[in-house]
């Protein structure tokens, strides 16, 4: 059984690698962007799905990674131009560092403080973009054209595919390890986890740092992918899209959010709008997405992935 | 100097009073049912839109306002119904109420556009207090907001309904055992709090203007205030709403308007670092 | 259980692949001219662009198309998001094979789309108000030369409009000496104030304070008090992004200070502004873009367009973007025909068309719904005889243009509380 599965995984990777042969460039561009979005979603799941702490400001780290990388690799901004790869990694590290400080402050407390604080965080960072606009470019953002790691759509596509696979493998390893088991112990019952000697704060912070790191990397990669950075990478609509994808796929499963991310991102950027146009209702695609989110939250709070898995297991 | 001080007190108090109405309800809902109601800002905005639309199409202003309040009460009921099946799952509660808030925001956006609406002040005119011109509507709003907050506080601390609310918020299971219908308390608190938010929205629309995006602003202020006051503490929220009002006005006066949002958000983060349970909060 | 995961993944990917394979195609013999229109399609700016382009295409097709080819319109939705915008632009350019793309809106999104434009070498007749875009054309002409601004003036020409506004007020007998500026905390207002300051100095007018406000700002009463205490005689909003110009208007009308409210407030341009503020917009002076064109069309073509739009869609253009988008289609048709007449091998080649578009300069504007000409950096030319923002005022529920005289249909009225 396990070997069949492995074979299947390899097959999937091969199919994704072969996509450029059959798919026109414009769609390839979108799919590559979807892979980067998937990294953001999976990294959110790493925190929320595995430790049960609801992070409502994950885009803080996407934006941080994006801005740090963009600033470091474009000489016109602060006079520094390091190699884009180094900039991407530093973007991730900066996000992780901020995550660490916020984590040690907010995760000491149980309950809802973490959610409230993280809900406000992206707004604080968005304000910095407007106030120090000589550096961050204000509402417009700025362009890194000419200093990006990637130049052709094909190279962009393979870069994001590779980044997704590496991140996925890394995060999977983490959750399957002993650390991952402790994350889940914290999620299931903090009291119980503490009683068996787990330092819950430490593991919550660790999960948060790791999750922020991958979000930062993804943000930095998005900038190299589309050549511009802007405050919308911090903004709430992106956050909601992340939540929707992860919840749809099923929290705490890594693969569920991956699938959720791909389905939702493609839907939102592709066919959902046409569907609404055909129905000609006074709504937009966001209304549909939020309604789906509410419905899933109530009817299948554990996500599509769990639900399907159980059905199949019952039959087997 | 006296001018400046007077200005700060007058403007800060009015802003604080309005946000206090929003935050106290938010805090009460959390205290009783442990639900972080992200759709609270939607009640604020919806009441104003309903009142604006009805009074604009010729209905009596006061009836329109009542209708607006009723709609915000219904919204509270809706939140209760939607969260009921998943109340134990805190992740889902947050996600559902947040999605509801954004859903309502988008519906308003699609149907009425992104530009704001504003109601004609119920009381016209301006008074001059020591060289500072203050609109009568601001004074009226202040009086109304404070009256509502005081009555809310009295209701919770003095009446038998209030005792049930307190009992439920301390331990809902124990409250159930001594014969309190906890679900009824939940409904009451949700509806009442949403009406308070709606009332704040109507006052806000008299002095300022409301656009779909204001719902998010109201929610953020509510957050800031309850974090400052301590989650679940009603009096904490009331006191800290005025503190937030003064911080806001002080920033505008001394640092400049551009810093107003930033300083407030930063102040909240700082308070969390120094005293994470807020001014009046208790650690859970 | 693991089996389920794999099957699910496979199904989704397979579905994606098969649906993708159906679409797409290669360029063959020209059968039609494809015009792409891109914008935020759930906002009035985008909707107006789409409707205007479709209207123009219909008219052109009724007259035999462009060089005999029928015009087809394809639509892209930016959702006001940079990621989506770059994807959609790419789709229009490479999958739909758009010959020209019209639209845009909002500076940040535009910046991202310009990169996609440069990569796909697509002619882009664009809308957004930041001077940063034209600057890119000047700095790296070869890369960005496909970009032309057709829809409205550059952010820095607002300064010229505003300086004219002050001059006009002084000439009309309202003495302006001190101006109190309230503006967006946003890059677009920086060049405006930078250019405006010396222009006001020339007139002997002082800027007593320059206040920046964040998005969603509401405490204007305090600023009005401050303006009063600084003896300002004009409060000049330069507001678009803040989104709360209506609150400023309302609080000004409530407090009734002895100060005129005149500047550029995006909210005031909205035709519904008077109703939404319950009439408190009365006497506000503002810069009108397309909105006021309905009552005072500057050209014959503009009048026809407004009427045709109303006839087809049942209402007037919902935003000024409609005029630019409509003009862009005719502009494109004109340059293609010019290129064909001059015997160009491929009159649809964007590199060729850039040269012909550049022929419309200061000495040679093309008269569409507005007289259009370009600067060297492909920015839209400003002036009474080209495109400018008209100085307008809300009077009893109606927008009147009060300056320049050539298009004015009303006169300045001071609020009764001004002494």
Image (spheres, rainbow, N blue to C red):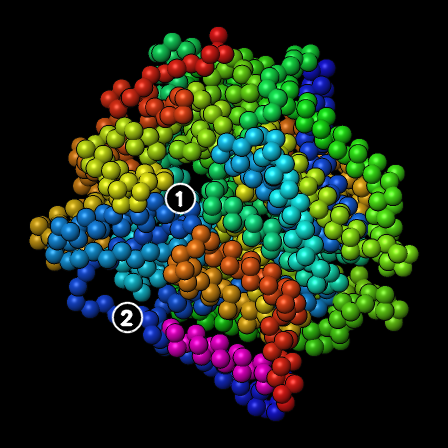
Pick the front one: A110 or A98: A110
Residue C405, picture quadrant: top left
Magenta part of the protein: which range?
C2-20
Label 1 lies in what chain? Answer: C
State the residue position of label 2: C25
State the SS at label 2. loop
Left or right: A86 as drawn, with respect to B262: left
Where is residue A84 shown, x and y percent of the image?
A: 50, 60
Pick the front one: C339 or A83: C339
List the single residue furthest toward the right.
B178
* In the image, residue A22 above or below residue C305: below
The residue depicted at 63 percent of the width and 64 percent of the height is A297
Crowd around label 1: few <14 · some 14–19 · many ≥20 (10 Å): many
N-terminal label among 1 and 2: 2
Label 2 lies in what chain? Answer: C
The circle on residue C44 is 1
Magenta stretch, main secondary structure class: helix
Where is residue C400 shown, x and y percent of the image?
A: 34, 23
Where is residue C240 shown, x and y percent of the image?
A: 46, 35
The circle on residue B242 is none
Residue C291, picture quadrant: top left
């Amino acid at each position: 059984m396990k070997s069949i599965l492995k074979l299947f995984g390899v097959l999937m990777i091969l199919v994704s690698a072969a996509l450029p042969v059959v798919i026109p460039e414009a769609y390839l561009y979108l799919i590559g962007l979807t892979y980067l979005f998937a990294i953001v979603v999976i990294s959110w799941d790493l925190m929320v799905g595995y430790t049960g702490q609801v992070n409502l400001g994950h885009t803080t780290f996407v934006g941080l990674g994006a801005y740090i990388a963009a600033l470091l690799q474009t000489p016109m901004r602060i006079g520094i131009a390091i190699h884009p790869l180094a900039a991407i990694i530093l973007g991730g590290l900066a996000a992780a560092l901020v995550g660490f400080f916020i984590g040690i402050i907010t995760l000491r407390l149980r309950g809802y403080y973490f959610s409230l604080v993280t809900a406000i965080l992206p707004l604080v960072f968005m304000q910095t973009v407007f106030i120090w606009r000589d550096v961050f470019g204000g509402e417009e953002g700025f362009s890194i054209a000419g200093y990006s790691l990637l130049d052709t759509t094909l190279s962009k596509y393979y870069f994001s595919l590779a980044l997704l696979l590496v991140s996925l493998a890394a995060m999977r390893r983490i959750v399957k390890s002993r650390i991952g088991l402790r994350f889940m112990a914290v999620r299931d019952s903090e009291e119980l986890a503490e009683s068996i000697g787990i330092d819950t704060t430490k593991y919550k912070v660790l999960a948060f740092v790791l999750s922020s790191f991958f979000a930062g990397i993804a943000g930095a990669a998005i900038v190299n992918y589309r050549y511009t950075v802007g405050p919308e990478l911090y903004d709430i609509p992106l956050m909601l899209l992340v939540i929707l994808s992860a919840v749809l796929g099923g929290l705490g499963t890594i693969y569920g959010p991956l699938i959720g991310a791909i389905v939702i991102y493609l839907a939102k950027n592709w066919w959902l709008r046409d569907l609404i146009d055909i129905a000609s209702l006074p709504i937009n695609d966001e209304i549909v997405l939020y309604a789906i989110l509410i419905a899933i939250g109530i009817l299948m709070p554990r996500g599509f992935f769990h639900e399907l898995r159980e059905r199949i297991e019952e039959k087997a | 100097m006296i001018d400046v001080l007077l200005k700060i007190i007058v403007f800060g108090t009015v802003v604080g009073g309005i946000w206090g109405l929003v935050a106290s309800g938010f805090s009460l809902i959390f205290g009783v049912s442990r639900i972080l109601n992200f759709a609270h800002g939607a009640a604020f905005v919806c009441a104003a839109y309903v009142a604006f639309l009805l009074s604009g199409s010729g209905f009596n202003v006061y009836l329109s306002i009542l209708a607006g309040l009723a709609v915000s009460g219904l919204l509270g009921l809706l939140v209760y119904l939607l969260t009921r099946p998943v109340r134990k799952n805190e992740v889902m509660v947050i996600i559902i109420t947040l999605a509801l808030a954004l859903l309502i925001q988008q519906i308003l956006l699609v149907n009425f556009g992104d530009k704001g609406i504003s109601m004609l002040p119920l009381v016209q005119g301006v008074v001059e207090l020591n060289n500072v011109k203050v609109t009568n509507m601001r004074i009226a709003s202040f009086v109304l907001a404070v009256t509502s907050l005081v009555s809310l506080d009295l209701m919770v601390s003095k009446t038998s309904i209030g005792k049930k609310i307190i009992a439920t918020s301390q331990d809902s299971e124990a409250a159930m055992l001594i014969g309190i219908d906890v679900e009824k308390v939940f409904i009451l608190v949700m509806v009442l709090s949403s009406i308070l938010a709606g009332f704040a929205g109507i006052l806000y629309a008299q002095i300022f203007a409301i656009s779909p995006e204001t719902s998010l602003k109201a929610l953020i202020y509510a957050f800031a205030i309850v974090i400052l006051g301590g989650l679940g503490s009603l009096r904490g929220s009331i006191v800290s709403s005025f503190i937030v009002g003064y911080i806001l006005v002080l920033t505008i006066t001394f640092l400049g308007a551009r810093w107003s949002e930033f300083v407030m958000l930063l102040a909240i983060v700082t308070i969390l670092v120094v005293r994470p349970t807020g001014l009046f909060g208790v650690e859970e | 259980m693991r089996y389920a995961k794999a099957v699910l993944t496979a199904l989704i990917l397979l579905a994606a692949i098969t649906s993708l394979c159906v679409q797409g195609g290669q360029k063959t013999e020209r059968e039609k001219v494809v015009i792409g229109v891109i914008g935020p399609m759930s906002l009035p700016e985008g909707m107006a662009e789409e409707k205007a382009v479709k209207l123009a295409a219909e008219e052109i097709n009724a007259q035999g198309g462009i060089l005999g080819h029928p015009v087809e319109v394809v639509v892209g939705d930016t959702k006001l998001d940079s990621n989506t915008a770059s994807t959609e632009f790419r789709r229009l350019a490479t999958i739909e094979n758009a010959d020209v793309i019209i639209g845009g809106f909002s500076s940040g999104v535009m910046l991202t789309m310009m990169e996609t434009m440069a990569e796909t070498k697509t002619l882009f007749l664009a809308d957004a108000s930041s001077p940063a875009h034209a600057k890119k054309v000047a700095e790296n002409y070869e890369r960005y030369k496909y970009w032309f601004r057709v829809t409205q003036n550059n952010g820095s020409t607002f300064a010229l409009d505003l300086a004219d506004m002050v001059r006009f007020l002084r000439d009309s007998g309202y003495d302006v000496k001190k101006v109190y500026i309230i503006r967006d905390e946003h890059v677009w207002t920086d060049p405006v104030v930078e250019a405006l300051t010396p222009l006001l100095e020339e007139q002997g007018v002082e800027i007593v304070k320059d206040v920046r406000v964040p998005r969603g700002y509401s405490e204007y009463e305090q600023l009005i008090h401050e303006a009063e205490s600084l003896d300002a005689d004009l409060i000049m909003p330069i507001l678009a992004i803040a989104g709360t110009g209506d609150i400023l208007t309302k609080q000004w009308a409530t407090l009734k200070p002895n100060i005129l409210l005149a500047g550029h407030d995006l909210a005031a341009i909205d035709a519904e502004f008077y109703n939404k503020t319950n009439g408190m917009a009365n006497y506000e002076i503002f810069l009108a873009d397309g909105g006021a064109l309905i009552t005072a069309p500057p050209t014959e073509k503009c009048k026809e367009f407004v009427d045709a739009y109303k006839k087809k869609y049942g209402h007037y253009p919902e935003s000024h973007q409609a005029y630019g988008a409509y003009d862009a289609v005719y502009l494109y048709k004109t340059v293609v025909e010019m290129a064909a007449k001059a015997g160009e091998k491929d009159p649809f080649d964007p590199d060729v068309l850039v040269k012909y578009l550049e022929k419309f300069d200061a000495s040679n504007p093309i008269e569409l719904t507005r007289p259009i000409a370009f600067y060297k950096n492909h920015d839209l030319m400003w002036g009474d005889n080209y495109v400018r923002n008209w100085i307008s005022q809300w009077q009893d529920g109606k927008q009147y243009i009060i300056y320049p005289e050539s298009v004015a249909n009303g006169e300045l009225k001071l609020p009764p509380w001004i002494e």
